[in-house]
Image (cartoon, rainbow, N blue to C red):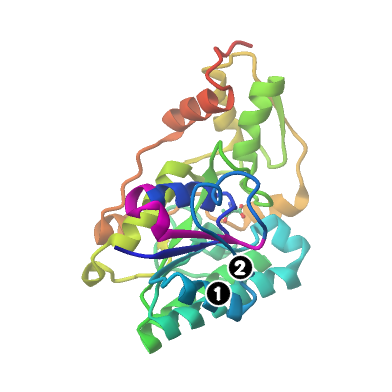
Amino acid sequence: MQRILVTGALGQVGSELVPALRTRYGTDHVIASDIRVAQRGAGDEGPFQLVDCTSQRQIQEAVRRYQIDTIYHLAALLSAVAEQKPQVAWDINMGGLYRTLEVARENRCAVFVPSSIGAFGPNTPTDGTPQDTIQRPTSMYGITKVAGELLCDYYHGRFGVDARGVRYPGIISHVTPPGGGTTDYAVEIFHDAVRHGRYTCFLRPDTRLDMMYMPDAVKAAIELMEADPERLRHRNAFNVTAMNFTPEELAAAIRRHMPGFTIDYGVDPVRQAIADSWPNSIDDSAARAEWGWAPSYDLLSMTADMLSHVSGGMTLTD
Ligand code: AKB
């Protein structure tokens, strides 16, 4: 049975990946870790360890103490906050990954590393973005993501570290807020719809981006780590997607349940510029062919499920 360490376990993905891993591999086999202590959530139901990923010693101690063989390295700053603090983003996103890979090399751990659609840039083909294509991102987040993909490839090729990863699109969840991403509007909109019946969106109405519901994001991580390595030609940074839409289209999907819901726009130039540099839609056929990736939720099923959870099961009327 695997012994797993999850870094950044209290973040958006970690809060739901940790319980899913514990259900699959056993509570005591999954160690949640973060730079802060859990108030509620990931750390409550099983082992928790404080780990600052910019400290190789702390990662090493956690790996040795719990005899870890697999690390899900989630600790990172998201795109909008990384643009506000580029130096901190470099330290955490690159420094944390480098140190995690070093510990993985020394202790023969497998590593899951999430990349992002942010690893693409303005001169990447925007529609049906291929798996292997031009990657010249213009945000600090994107630079750390593409450099991270290359570093994972290097650790696999040079040292045999079993590093694997996906390029996540925007992730939508009702459990933990994302905190500092360009795609956060697709989460905020549900909370404001239920609370106020209206939402002011920080991206333009026609901004098309790929998205994924959290159960699919969790499934992607676990299935890729369980995939037969012989079948993996790409290993790191598989394009994965489940749906793509614009704010206008998401609002229309919400209106099917709440006819009176309204949306208006107060565009944030920084996040809009980041979104404009990302693809409209990515091609995830390599993930489908190499490890059987197939999402379960589309725009309509995700919207219905989000509204039901965010409203706590209340009947929605306008
Ligand atoms: C962000 O908006 O920063 C993330 C991402 C797409 O990587 N959700």
| CA distance separating discs 2 and 1 | 6 Å
* Residue in the image at 63% along x and 77% along y: 55
Instruction: Tell me where the magenta segment starts and ends, as one range.
Output: 23-35
Amino acid at pointer 2 = Val
Q: Residues within 10 Å of mark 2 (few under 14, many from 20)?
A: many
* 63 relative to 92 in the view: left or right: left
Residue 28 lies in magenta, yes or no?
yes
- Residue toward you, 97 or 123: 97
Looking at the rendered image, the quarter that the C terminus falls into is top right
| Residues marked 2 and 1 touching at CB (< 8 Å) | yes
- Would residue 209 be seen by someone viewing this image from the given angle? no
* Residue in the image at 56% along x and 22% along y: 312
| Rendered view: 205 above or below 229 | above
Residue 85's label in the rendered image is: none
Mark 2 vs mark 1: which is more N-terminal? 2
Q: Quadrant of residue 87 in the image?
A: bottom right
| Rendered view: 310 above or below 205 | above
Seen as rendered, the residue at the extreme bottom is 158
Is ligand 1 closer than 8 angstroms to the Cβ of mark 2? no
Q: Position of residue 42 (x, y in %)?
A: 54, 49
Q: Position of residue 267 (x, y in %)?
A: 75, 42
Residue 271 lies in magenta, yes or no?
no
Residue where numbered disc 2 is placed: 51
Looking at the rendering, the quadrant in which ligand 1 lies is bottom right
- Would residue 123 be seen by someone viewing this image from the given angle? yes
* Label 2: which secondary element: loop
Amino acid at pointer 1 = Ile
- Residue toward you, 273 or 18: 18
Q: Quadrant of residue 95 in the image?
A: bottom right
- Residue toward you, 33 or 162: 33
